[in-house]
Image: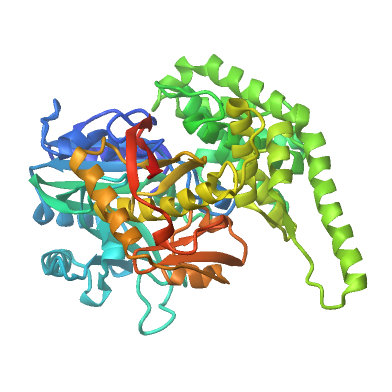
Amino acid sequence: MKTYTSQSIREMYLNFFKDRGHKVIPSASLIPENDPTVLFTTAGMHPLVPYLLGEKHPAGTRLTDVQKCVRTGDIDDVGDASHCTFFEMLGNWSLGDYFKQEMIPWSYEFLTGKDYLGLDPDKLAVTVFGGDETLPCDDEAAALWEKAGIKRENIYYMSRENNWWGPAGLTGPCGTDTEMFIIRKPKCSPTCNPDCKCGAFLEIWNDVFMRFNKQADGTYTELSQKNVDTGMGLERALCVLTGKSSVYETDLFEDAIKVISTLTGKAYDADPETTRAFRVILDHTRTATFMIGDEKGIVPSNTDQGYILRRIIRRAVRFGRKIDLPEGSLAKIAAAYIEKYKSVYPELEVNRDKIFEELAKEEAKFTKTLQQGLKEFEKCLNGIERKNAFMAQNNPDYVPEKRINGKQAFHLYDTYGFPVEITDEMAKERGYSVDMDGYKAAFEEHQSKSKAGSEQKFACGLADNKEATTRLHTATHLLHAALKKVYSDEVNQKGSNITEERLRFDFNLPQPMTAEEIKKVEDLVNEVIAQNLPVVMQEISLEEAKAQGFTGLFESKYGERVKTYTIGDFSKEICGGPHAATTGELGKFKITKEQSCGSGLRRIKAVLQ
């Protein structure tokens, strides 16, 4: 039986495609150059976007590499068996060269060939695009898989949601894909398919057939060339091929586990809570090592990539306390990763001292206030429990409150350095939630005081709750909806500040608005104002709000019930701030300025005349 290691799989993959005319290219930086709408390189295609769009790559039209990637959407899930923030993506590309007819047989050969992964063809399933109102189903891909050796009953036609890839940002190359799965156990029902959550299927590889370029307005144009973009996660592939139950039990983590065990005197698998703490520390320290050690290395800060780095280091420190990890340990764990990866990513060795220095500084900074912060957190919970006990004595129908208010959450951030996500996670561990809208209001109050004296901030970015600001706040709902209609539903609010005189609205868009687009947005808002539509508030459950298509900035952080505001069929938003009764109260909407306010972000200033 073949023995697989992380290095043997990297070499096997690269050599397979090298033998088929591909040039091996190095991993690009974790900080993307060609996609301002994301903070990190989240997929192997990010560094190659210009070439997927038609620019000539110096290495030719057939490329292969192992790309280092970071995805931060699931940080709170890290600690289970599979989630990682940093991972390596094995990939190969055709830049206008080959397409499905070559890639699908190659995929089958690599998966099943005895010189490669050697998987049982009967234990493989694939999905292909099932068609919709814009594109027909991908019968060609299905036929190629069946010809290669996949049983017909193991070929599944799936929806766009399952078999459409990209773009990772707001705009860029995209297309239908075919995904490959290992069948791990019998299906749970006759209708069970690879999208089922029963665990019967585990995805291992993905081939994307890029024919389209998504525009900022949500439309698609044909690319000048047809491309192939594939991705196989190294961690998951290694886990499957070595028969491990978790990616953390592969050779990628074994040296770091030994370091943590030595430092704490605890075994990785001592109990579920200890295992979870180990995994959080393992993942977050590895990710921090690669972020700091990157050729465009970052350092902890309160904005953008630096904030994510600070958050994961501090989360690692907090979980370290759970298993008695001594202060100053993160650099020692990082040393194990540098030794493990330096032959593949030499920049880690080059930046070794910087990695140690930044980890030690951030760990010491947070450790100094961590104990006090945890005491303050306990005081918050104790205060809530005392209030609940008092209220219950006087009212048998009283429903206990299990919510930390926004000012308390901001105090933990401002005074003790707890990112609000850490406070939220700690609260959930104890059966509580955090008032995220209240936190935002407290944060913006703090920001405004530094700029404009002592003006008090209210929820949703309002400087006060006077009539003028209320009307401008209602106008932001119309502005938000109009931007989505002019561009796409992927345009979302990223910040808001409203005074009596004007509104300021930040949103994601990779390019400046044209004069025509600005006028189109203004016209859409003013048309709704002219209709004098009622602004209808309804309090419903968060699940109902999501099902009904309401937009929300902090959907994952809301309580069980939310306030929703509907303006005709034009705008539907979850919001906690004050609103006008009808749109006719607003007056004429006018955009006074449109400008950049960050990478991939735009800012509108507008007034009501």
Going 40% across and 22% down the picture, which residue do you hit? 296
Quadrant containing the C terminus is: top left
Going 45% across and 22% down the picture, which residue do you hit? 297
Q: Could you tell whether 288 is left or right of 257 in the image?
A: left
> Relative to the observer, which residue lies in front, 175 or 25?
175
The spot of residue 358 in percent (x, y) is 59, 20
Going 49% across and 64% down the picture, which residue do you hit? 581
Please tell me whether residue 241 is drawn above or below residue 448 in the rendered image: below
Please tell me whether residue 360 is drawn above or below residue 227 in the rendered image: above
The coloring applied to the image is: rainbow
Please tell me whether residue 322 is drawn above or below residue 207 in the rendered image: above
Instruction: Name the quadrant containing residue 171.
Output: top left
Is residue 344 visible in the rendered structure shown here?
yes
Q: Could you tell whether 1 is left or right of 171 in the image?
A: right
The spot of residue 268 in percent (x, y) is 67, 46
> Relative to the observer, which residue lies in front, 348 or 367?
367
> Relative to the observer, which residue lies in front, 78 or 106?
78
Instruction: Name the quadrant containing residue 601.
Output: top left
Going 39% across and 42% down the picture, which residue do you hit? 607
Is residue 18 visible in the rendered structure shown here?
no
Total residue callouts:
0
> Relative to the observer, which residue lies in front, 442 or 319?
442
The spot of residue 66 in percent (x, y) is 32, 36
